[in-house]
Image: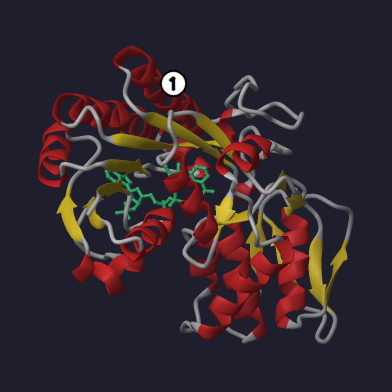
Amino acid sequence: MKRALITGIAGQDGSYLAEFLLAKGYDVFGLVLRDEPLRWIDPIKDRLILMEGDLRNQKSLDHAVRQALPDEVYHLGALPFVAISWKQPVLTADVNALGTTRLLEALRSITPHARIYHASTSEMFGLTEEIQTEEGLFHPRNPYSISKCYSHWIAVNYRESYDMYVCCGIMFNHESPRRGENFVTRKIARGVVDIKEGKQDCLYLGNLDVWRDWGYASEYVEVMWLMLQQDAPDDYIISTGEVHTVREFLEEAFCVVGLDAERNGKKGIEEAYIRKDNGQAVVRISPEFFRPVELTVLRGSNSKAKGKLKWEPKTRFRELVRIMVDYEMQNTRPTQSIREVKRR
Ligand code: NAP
């Protein structure tokens, strides 16, 4: 039986990957920052071997690697929220950049033959509007992606310096009902359902006209595994190849819940979406959700992954929106105060 160690196992990708590897018969070890709340892995916790550890603490990583003695390592643990990275740039760098180096050091000294997947990100491309390939230049535009450029290159460097099997998945956005609540897709999915059910009056959003390539997280974990089953390690862009705006996501979510609302005012800070049945504003734009520098578009070509890994995404944009909104409709929450809603 193969042994896998997943950092960030309680997060969106970690939880889907844990389910995927259990189904393949792996012994799955997971690093958790704290033992509660386990969130998405709670239902499968008895089938996992969980260890508390922090990417800021070398000893805890050494201990986890010694306990797991993994054949495969999936390094997903990170602080991935761009907006928070501006507020906590030092912590972001410590966890994402140095945390990766600490983990690689533990692996190099304890299990140098383990195969390693590193979660790189399309955000590293930053200010480049062309369709990206694995050879594209990085121009990161926020502390999160800068920390990820460091962790990406240190991962590549351990492959080149020590001949370790390290792969980087340069993943474009991937979403699901398990996405963190601060991310715009989840916020919209929750918000439109709460508005439809009368639990919330208005959803406050930032720039609606940024373009993103959104895939479905549950199918992106398979390709992480595929990267570690090849003859040689390599880096791959993982994307759907389709881009849509936040505005499209919002309008599609309205359709799914059956909320009839139309845009009022010029696009930008003054605009609002108004409910046709009662004239109330259901979406307003709030400057607090604008970033100091924005990436207007992120586009990537997945042809290398298609060709070499024989992997292709199946879930398209409209279906993804439906999956996320349906989940929120089936998991209702108590009414929230306007203050709470705005804070998210
Ligand atoms: P996520 O849901 O936020 O999961 C991240 C996990 O990292 C969480 O379980 C978190 O623990 C853990 N973590 C945070 N700080 C830690 C620390 N100091 N020590 C140990 N663990 C720590 O994020 P995700 O969407 O699954 O993303 C997984 C990885 O893919 C991340 O590295 C992210 O940067 C990368 N990525 C994601 C996307 C995307 O669209 N989702 C795109 C490109 C790259 P808690 O559960 O305790 O908070």
Residue at the farthest top position: 161
- Please tell me which residue is depicted at 16% across the width and 39% down the height of the picture: 65
Residue 123 in the image: above or below residue 13: above
Residue 46 in the image: state x and y as whole percent: 19, 70
Circle 1 packing at 10 Å, graded few (<14), some (14-19), many (20+), is some
Q: Is residue 190 left or right of residue 276?
A: left
Vertical relation: 217 (above or below) 93: below
Amino acid type indicated by mark 1 = Trp
- Residue in the foreground of this view, choosing between 115 and 40: 115
Q: Position of residue 134 (x, y in %)?
A: 61, 27
- In the foreground, 217 or 88: 217
* Residue 102 x, y percent position in the rendering: 24, 28
Residue topped by disc 1: 153
Quadrant for residue 79, please give it: top left
- What is the x, y in percent for residue 202? 66, 71
Report the front residue among 129 and 187.
Answer: 129
Give the left or right position of residue 130, taking residue 66 as reference: right
Placement of 245 over or under 100, stated as above or below:
below
Residue drawn 76% across and 52% down? 244
Question: Is residue 256 toward the left or the right of residue 9 in the image?
Answer: right
Q: Quadrant of the N terminus?
A: bottom left
Q: How is the image coloured?
A: secondary structure
The answer to whether 203 appears left or right of 64 in the picture is right
Q: Is mark 1 within 8 Å of ligand 1?
A: no
Residue drawn 80% across and 85% down?
A: 278
Secondary structure beneath dot 1 equals helix
